[in-house]
Image (tube, rainbow, N blue to C red):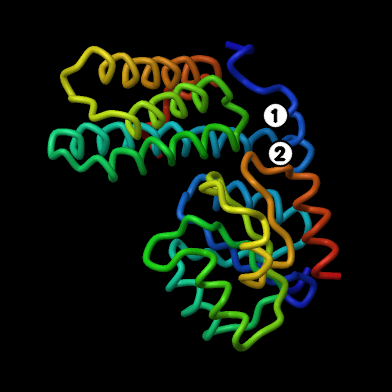
Amino acid sequence: MTDVDFKKVLVAEDSSVIQNLLKKILLFENCKITSAKDGQSVLDQFELEEFDLVIMDINLPKLDGLEATRQIRQKSNIPIIGISGNAQNLSEDIFFKAGMNEYMQKPLDYDKLIEWVKKYTS
Amino acid sequence: MQEEINSATLETLLQHMSKDDYLELVKEFVLNTELQLQNIHYNAFRAESQAVIRAVHSIKGNAISLGFDLLSHQSAEFEKALKETEIKTNSAIFVQYISAIAKSIENLVDYFNIDDRRRF
């Protein structure tokens, strides 16, 4: 299989365990994963290459996932799926207003996540 | 030990990855959590409460993602206690939480037979 067959997904998550978990799951779905551990790295990576989808944790160091999403939205309509282990009692509106297409709290519903990945990369 | 693991989460994960892949993640989780426990001690002695809370929060999120519900619950209780009150590192409650998490990790190591984790 060549690179052309893969969908390129940028995973923004500061936990290496969850990064690798998502890598393994999405590899099964023919996705090629690039990881970023903080919000600034997301923006830097976004400048370097094109992606089909972003999976964005909210609680990222340096620049949080909401702000990184707002900055991406100034230049791109790429689908963004937000994930968070602690929504800090924020209403779901905030995630969508920042520009996320979908939002999911941890623990992740892996079946639903894959459904969304397929939906937004097909 | 089986009751400490969410069988539904495990079943779902194994639908999307091989058993070997899952075991790799468990090994990484064990090593990562041991490092986080060291971070907790280091930062607690320096009264860096936010760093301690972040480390406990990280253990909680990683544990629930892999189906380790008891460990996630223990971490959630610890995180809640840390946010509600200042806990001294030599207090009984601090030692109790740390010991519970460390014990759960040892149970995982035994259950998944990953004594060779230090080679990774």
Instruction: Check the image and report above or below for A48 versus B35.
Output: below
**Residue at x-position 46% and y-position 64%:** A64
Residue type (three-letter) at the residue carrying disc 2: Ser
**Residue at x-position 62% and y-position 64%:** A33
- Farthest bottom residue? A75
Relative depth, front residue between B74 and A15: B74
Q: Quadrant of residue A32?
A: bottom right
Q: Which mark is residue B116?
A: none
**Residue at x-position 63% and y-position 54%:** A91
Q: Quadrant of residue B112?
A: top right
Q: CA distance from mark 2 to mark 1?
A: 11 Å
Secondary structure of the residue carrying tag 2 is loop
Relative depth, front residue between B13 and A55: A55
Q: Chain of mark 1?
A: B
Q: Chain of mark 2?
A: B
Is A114 placed left or right of A12 in the picture?
right
Residue type (three-letter) at the residue carrying disc 1: Leu
Q: Quadrant of residue B119?
A: top left
**Can you identify the residue that label 2 sits on?**
B18
- Farthest left residue? B46
Relative depth, front residue between A79 and A103: A103
Which callout, 2 or 1, points at the residue further toward the start of the chain?
A: 1
Of the 4 image quadrants, the one containing the N terminus of chain A is: bottom right
Q: Are marks 2 and 1 in contact (CB under 8 Å)?
A: no
The crowding category of the residue bearing disc 2, from other C-alpha atoms within 10 Å (few below 14, some 14 to 19, many at least 20), is: some
* Picture coordinates of residue B47, whole percent (x, y): 16, 38
2 vs 1, front mark: 1
* Picture coordinates of residue B106, whole percent (x, y): 42, 17
**Can you identify the residue that label 1 sits on?**
B10
* Picture coordinates of residue A57, whole percent (x, y): 55, 57
